[in-house]
């Protein structure tokens, strides 16, 4: 259990760095596009598209980090009003299982779409060197990272259900 949390911490630190790099690249590309369009009077054909792909990846990686930090939108008001700690743990465990089921479908279907796009050999319209499969890979990849985070929550909630003792993480990322 502690190993999973340590692993998730390392993975999410890497994801935060990747998100930061993605945003920096996106800002540089958009700035370069503006400079070329207005100063040189010749717009780049590829910078806007590549910036949108960086944004795509940053969005999905950010969703995974939000699961780790338990900052996704949730309605914890009613769950927090449940007086029994074990009942609260049960409700949160059910929510975790629902999240895992949903994310499992995301992984399966996201991988199906990604592998289909790779098999078609599609490339970005203005950058023929960039396979579109890499862009679609963001969805199943981030979903796998989210599953790891939700599993850590589920283990905490199950421990709370069995022992009746509060764990360090009692909120749900659902």
Image: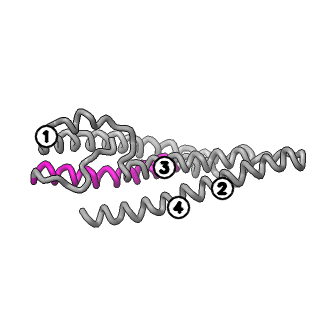
Look at the image and say whether residue 155 sits in the magenta stretch: yes
Could you classify mark 4 by the number of other residues whose Cα lies within 10 Å: few (under 14), some (14-19), or many (20 or more)? few
Question: Quadrant of the image for the C terminus?
Answer: top left
| Of residues 97 and 111, the one drawn nearer to the viewer in this rendering | 97
Q: Nearer the viewer, residue 75 or 155?
A: 75
For this orientation, the residue located farthest to the top is 78
Side of 122 relative to 144 (left or right) = right
Q: CA distance from mark 4 to mark 1?
A: 38 Å
For the residues labelled 1 and 3, say whether their Cβ atoms are less than 8 Å apart.
no
Mark 1 and mark 3: Cα distance apart in space: 31 Å
Residue 8 is labelled as: none
For the residues labelled 2 and 3, the Cα–Cα distance comes to 16 Å
Task: Kindly state the secondary structure of the residue where label 1 is placed.
Answer: helix
Would residue 66 be visible to someone looking at this image? yes
User: Residue 44: image x %, image y %?
Assistant: 81, 47
Residue 86's place in the image compared with 10, above or below, is above
Q: Which residue is mark 2?
A: 25
**Residue at point 89%, 45% (across, down):** 41
Location of residue 111 in the rendering, given as x and y in whole percent from the top left corner? 46, 47
Q: Which residue is mark 3?
A: 62
- 2 or 4: tag closer to the N-terminus: 4
**In this rendering, is residue 75 above or below 110?**
above
How far is disc 2 from disc 1 in space, using C-alphas? 46 Å
Q: Are marks 2 and 4 in contact (CB under 8 Å)?
A: no
| Residue shown at the point (54%, 44%) measured from the top left | 116
Residue for badge 1? 87
45 with respect to 2 (left or right): right
Which residue corresponds to mark 4? 17
Q: Provide the residue span drawn in magenta.
A: 138-163
Q: Earlier in the sequence, mark 4 or mark 1?
A: 4
């Amino acid at each position: 259990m502690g190993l999973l949390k340590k692993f998730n911490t390392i993975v999410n630190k890497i994801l935060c760095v990747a998100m930061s790099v993605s945003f920096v690249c996106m800002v540089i590309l958009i700035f370069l596009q503006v400079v070329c369009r207005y100063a040189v009077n010749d717009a780049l054909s590829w910078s806007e598209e590549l910036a949108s792909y960086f944004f795509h990846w940053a969005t999905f990686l950010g969703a995974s980090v939000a699961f780790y930090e338990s900052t996704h939108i949730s309605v914890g008001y009613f769950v927090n009003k449940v007086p029994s700690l074990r009942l609260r743990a049960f409700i949160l465990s059910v929510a975790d299982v629902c999240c895992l089921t949903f994310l499992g479908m995301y992984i399966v279907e996201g991988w199906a779409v990604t592998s289909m796009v790779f098999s078609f050999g599609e490339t970005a319209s203005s950058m023929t060197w960039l396979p579109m499969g890499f862009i679609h890979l963001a969805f199943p990849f981030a979903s796998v990272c989210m599953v790891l985070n939700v599993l850590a929550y589920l283990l905490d909630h199950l421990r709370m259900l069995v022992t009746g003792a509060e764990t360090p993480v009692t909120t749900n990322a659902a």
